[in-house]
Amino acid sequence: MVKVGIIGVGTVGTSVVQILKDNSDIISARAGKEIVVTKGTVRNLNKKRDIDISLSDNLNDVLEDESIDIVVELMGGVDEPYKVVKKALENGKSVVTANKALLAYHRYELQNIAGEIAFGFEASVAGGIPIIKALREGLSANHIEKISGIMNGTCNFILTKMSEEGADFAETLKEAQELGYAEADPTFDVGGFDAAHKLLILASIAYGIDAKPEDILIEGIENISSVDIDFAKEFGYVIKLLTIAKKVGNEVELRTHPTLINKNEMIAKVDGVMNGVSVIGDKLGESMYYGAGAGGDATASAVISDIIDIVRSGKSSPMLGFKRPLEGEQFSLAKKENITSGYYIRMSVEDKAGVLAKVATLLGENSISVKTMLQKPLNDGGANLLFSTHTAKEADIQSALSKIKELNFIKDKIVMIRVEE
Amino acid sequence: MVKVGIIGVGTVGTSVVQILKDNSDIISARAGKEIVVTKGTVRNLNKKRDIDISLSDNLNDVLEDESIDIVVELMGGVDEPYKVVKKALENGKSVVTANKALLAYHRYELQNIAGEIAFGFEASVAGGIPIIKALREGLSANHIEKISGIMNGTCNFILTKMSEEGADFAETLKEAQELGYAEADPTFDVGGFDAAHKLLILASIAYGIDAKPEDILIEGIENISSVDIDFAKEFGYVIKLLTIAKKVGNEVELRTHPTLINKNEMIAKVDGVMNGVSVIGDKLGESMYYGAGAGGDATASAVISDIIDIVRSGKSSPMLGFKRPLEGEQFSLAKKENITSGYYIRMSVEDKAGVLAKVATLLGENSISVKTMLQKPLNDGGANLLFSTHTAKEADIQSALSKIKELNFIKDKIVMIRVEE
């Protein structure tokens, strides 16, 4: 019998206990042994919980219990889980975690500490979708060209709703909060940080890139309006919070931002709270993985698949795939300002002579080449100027926009959304 | 160094050799050892080939070579590959195959012969998509409720083209043949047999069902016309060759047939030659796996992922997941005639009094309950009668249709397509 201790028994932990019981037949058969949660820790012992395992509010009751083989960390946060996981590994226990924030900051230290000890984190990216297994094992013959993910269900729910109902961001966020799809403080999700954490984990597996959230380009969906969603639709695009890791020569671009995607791309069809991750391998081409990115049972499904793998194999795959860098391989993180993309730009302007010329001049002077341009009258007598651009550098578009916004005929905030072809 | 021998070096085999060379850095790193193809067999040694491994036309040069660790079987066919794989396993060599027909008939015998020897067949289902790994390991905590797959690129290409261009089956098949997406004799693909073979493999992993192709319901796409595709579209459906394994109580339905699917389902969005497999787990809910289901490099990507797994783990997962049946589990194959589904029915009739009443009476007498009905005039003065039905039994719909087709006002073949909600 394999004994599991859970640090931080909340929604996911309760599901882990329940599924191990509900599906013990299939789980024991697959693992070759019975797997039982014997202990869990919680912050508040007085809160009533619907599970029948021994609970404690002292972490050491799990970490120092010699009978426990596998520690599952489900606390949330970064610093405390780091100490907990470190201690568990140092005590020789295998560890499984669903904590993306922890890994966004400490995956390399933890990999070093883990060494030969098994460390699973399938549940940390895209919930129940076995994307880490696919990337690390299923596509093991491939160099990865690009990963594009819709990995935050809150953002995808909001953007899908806005697109379907023409609603604005604020009211849709409120609806998401009422449905339990968004937190009271939604910044972590709608600001793009949650998706960026997951990106960093996948980028380590695919490229061995050691970066922190603050090193990469992160933009949230707070400024997306139904106006832009409608314009995008008119031209055959949808707007998604897309999370991208892309190899460009010896550099890897890592970025999370609202993105116009051609509606015929498979990833563009991932709607609502669902997640999807598209991976382009140099030999396989595109494959995509779709499913529930959150929720107690879905996340627990991934946690338990890690536990079963650990029990069955009795040893660890290298946590981040294998030792990097490979011989002759030297990936480095592309600087934010060097990232290239196409851009959608919308600006509300006064409708008077010379406006278009001035904007076009500033774009040209900053090496931004216009692909399509459209002017649409606004009700107040002004006009919306819409541009799509050819591929250009982040630094150039930022420079152009900072100059354009100073022009006196610009009436409102300029909207810039990246376009991924 | 791990030595691999390939039996049947064709398109896929050539890709395996090439990728092991091209991506040796990443493959060695992941496997922990260098992997090299040292020998291959071909039928005709005189045919010029663009690879630099030692070739022979004698299978035993690979099967009895003691230096070879892993045999990759890529011959095609059933009987000869069965002998080859059996002999390789008996000689203690690990085996990797992409041969779905072999497994459709002999997976249980081969599992028994393999015992503790590693036997990989990821490439046999949906080409490069790691669906077997997902089902066996990624979803290992789940009882599988249902698998729905678009697993034949030829059929999906033809149906997608017919839908996009309003073309008919015969001309689209010809186009597919010209593009190399369909064989000169297309029966194996368009008749649904290829997809059915893959289904049997997945059904063994999910349910431990031991069935042969002739035991299950298989219908091809030869009778799908653009008329029906258009009607389907009008009501929000697409028509796909869908391959279904579905748990109903203690029985499992296994079937491959053209199917009306709601266009908003993720699986309905899998177009062209691409494959997609949707899996519903009792805990995870739906997840879907999408990618290239055929092609040399994509298939080789899966073959090599199996080789890497074998080299890395040094031991085998149970070939079909684990020993079945589990305690208390007794899945049996649902009889074809007991399979239930909704149905779309179209019949061309003479436009005269009493026609609808007679048809409706025969449907009712055979326990077929009509959900929607539509009559559309035909150019020749007759009419198209369109029905969609509530869920009904296969035996009942067949009985009803066999009686209706005898009615003297029926002008053409009656079309029946199953509907999956």
Image (tube, coloured by chain):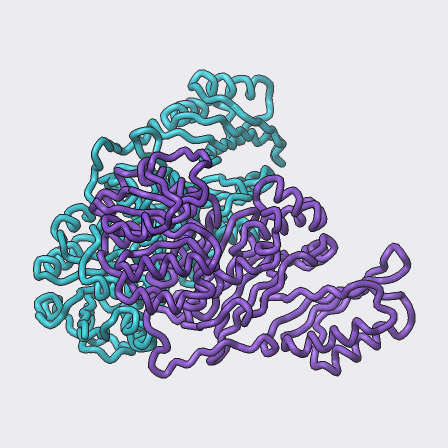
Chain colours: A cyan, B purple
Q: Is residue A364 left or right of residue B143?
A: right
Q: Quadrant of the C terminus of chain B?
A: bottom right
Residue at image position (16%, 54%) is A82
Residue B222 image-quadrant placement: bottom right
**In this orientation, does residue B271 appear?**
yes
Quarter of the rendering occupied by the N terminus of chain B: top left
Name the foreground residue: B283 vs B203: B203
Residue at the (24%, 33%) spot, across then down: A329
- Which residue is nearer to you in this view: A112 or B129? B129
* Residue B325 horizontal/vertical position (percent): 37, 77
The reply, left or right, for residue B408 in relation to residue B310 is: right
Where does the image place residue A366, in percent across and percent down from the top left? 42, 19
Please state the horizontal and vertical placement of residue A37, each as a whole percent of the image: 21, 73
The residue lying toward the viewer, choosing from A59 and B271, is B271
Q: Residue B396 in the image: state x and y as whole percent.
A: 68, 78
Q: What residue is at 33 percent from the left and 66 percent from the top?
A: B140
Q: In which quarter of the image is residue B11?
A: top left
How many badges with numbers are in the image?
0
- From what the image shows, is residue A222 above or below residue A408? below
Task: In the rendered view, tell whether residue A308 sits above or below residue A384.
Answer: below
* Residue A243 shows up from this direction: no
Q: Residue at x 50, y 40 (%)?
A: A261
Q: Is residue A119 above or below residue B350?
A: above
Identify which residue, B199 or A257, lies in the foreground. B199
